[in-house]
Amino acid sequence: MSKSKDILNVGVLGLGTVGGGVVSALQSSPELFESRSGKHIKVVAACVRNPNKNRSAIAMNFPITSNPFDIVEDPKIDLVLELIGGVEPARRLVLTALNNGKNVVTANKALLAVHGEEIFRLAAEKNCFVGYEAAVAGGIPIIKVIREGLVANKITKLHGIINGTCNYILTGMEKHQSAFDDILIEAQQKGFAEEDPSFDIGGIDAAHKLTILASLLFKIPLELDKISVVGIADVELEDINYAKKLGYKIKHLAVAEKSENGVELRVGPALVPETDMLSKVDEEMNAIRLEGNLLGPLLMSGAGAGAGPTASSVLSDIVDSIRNSKLEWASVITNNSDNEPSSDLVITAEQTIASAFYYRLVASNEPGMLASITNILAANNISIEAVIQDEEGKKADRVPILIVTEKIKQRQADATRLALSEMPGIFSPVKQFRVK
């Protein structure tokens, strides 16, 4: 550890977009962070894949290594910034740093979602700080709000847009009337989507973040495999336009709701009413709405990614580590260092909280077809809120049909989709999305 009580020596794993942004901010405004933390925050070493790469935005006045264990095993380093991403070797590096008594700040949601229990337990044993504000929703300080600002509330519900890539694509499809693949390419060109976007558009990134948030909110274990995960690749421009005709926008929502049966966790496309503020969150922005028994609804919105917003959250955690405030709250994800996570289970499809569903299908243009479709819904005990036969989209032999149901359980919705898909006279896969 550093000998001076007035200096915090920081080692950085990764000088990419976020790491570079953090170091640049510390170098450009050292007095600001010293006045707010009471210490001079000094970057004393960094690990990068390519030490010879030009990093003109950073004053390279500290040694560079390509061996990450040089950082986590350096006795003069007080705090390690883990900004390399991925599960391994990030897990081994974080555990090594904690075993060596170093505090850790990370933006790695995948690591925490999969190995968070192990990491937070070790941090508690070693009396070390683990900051992870940057792991969820970029610049929105949602972790601190849950840990500190809402301690008097029993939170029952979280609805959020927590993946900027998905939101950018869905917004672009609507605004530019373009196909999914075209907007995805645009998002990649602008840096809002990775070269391999599968984690984002497949819903995995949002599921990682929801795993962390749900564990904080409801004291349930970090169990990524219990989340129902649906991506946005199945959303077509027709669905976005039909949703608009019905008074909705399609958003990729992360949902955590508590009921008498347990906690329901899911991420996937949903039709959000245009009167709902979440429907107005566009482009790469994120938003999270919580509902508490005392507070009522609380909506927070901000940039979900990027150098500035994510660096803001990382820097906030660094200052928190210096203040040494509520270490047990920051290090144990359940918000309670004396208790294990509760035994509440993520609920099954049989128990899910009911919601309305939207179906889109293309049916044979013949007498009695609509009656046959409604008979299938009736056989599954489903009442219909609205049904539209799109006359503008009708062709000689087929017609698009839109259905919005009353509130039903997931198992009913899935059984109905299967039955509709197997009907004679159905031309295309039946689309099915929740309605918020």
Image (cartoon, rainbow, N blue to C red):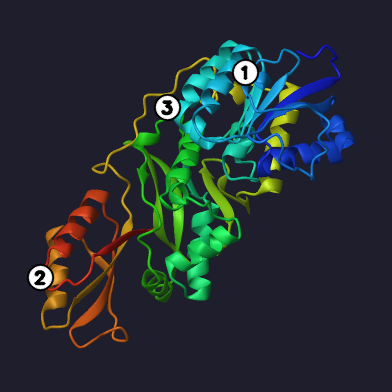
Q: Residue 38's x, y, as percent?
A: 85, 25
Residue neighbourhood size for the residue with mark 1, other residues' Cα within 10 Å, grouped as few (<14), some (14–19), many (≥20)? many
**What is the x, y in percent for residue 357?**
31, 60
Badge 1 is on which residue?
A: 97
Judge left or right: residue 119 versus residue 30.
Answer: left
- Asked whether residue 316 appears in the rendered view, the answer is yes
- Tell me which label, 2 or 3, sits earlier in the chain: 3
Residue in view at x 52 percent, y 68 percent:
172
**In terms of secondary structure, where does tag 1 sit?**
helix
Residue topped by disc 2:
424
Q: Is residue 388 above or below residue 165?
A: below
Q: Residue farthest to the right? A: 31
**Residue of label 3:** 221
Q: Given the image, on which type of amino acid does mark 2 rest?
A: Pro
- Which of pointers 2 and 1 indicates the residue nearer the eye? 1
Q: Position of residue 132 (x, y in %)?
A: 60, 32
Q: Say which label, 3 or 1, has the lower sequence index.
A: 1
- The picture places residue 423, in percent across and down from the top left corner, at 12, 67
Task: Label 2, secondary structure: give it.
Answer: loop
- The kind of residue tagged 1 is Ala
The residue lying toward the viewer, choosing from 167 and 348, is 167
Residue 154 visible, this angle: no
Tell me what residue is drawn at x 15 percent, y 57 percent.
Answer: 380
The amino acid pointed to by label 3 is Pro
Is 132 located above or below residue 188 in the figure? above
Tell which tag, 3 or 1, sits nearer the viewer.
1
Query: Where is 98 relative to 235, above or below?
Result: above
- Callout 3: few (<14), some (14-19), or many (20+) C-alpha neighbours within 10 Å? many
Which residue lies at the image location 62% right of the left edge and 20% below the top edge? 69
Foreground of the two, 90 or 25? 90
Q: CA distance from mark 3 to mark 1?
A: 23 Å
**C-alpha span from label 2 to label 3:** 45 Å
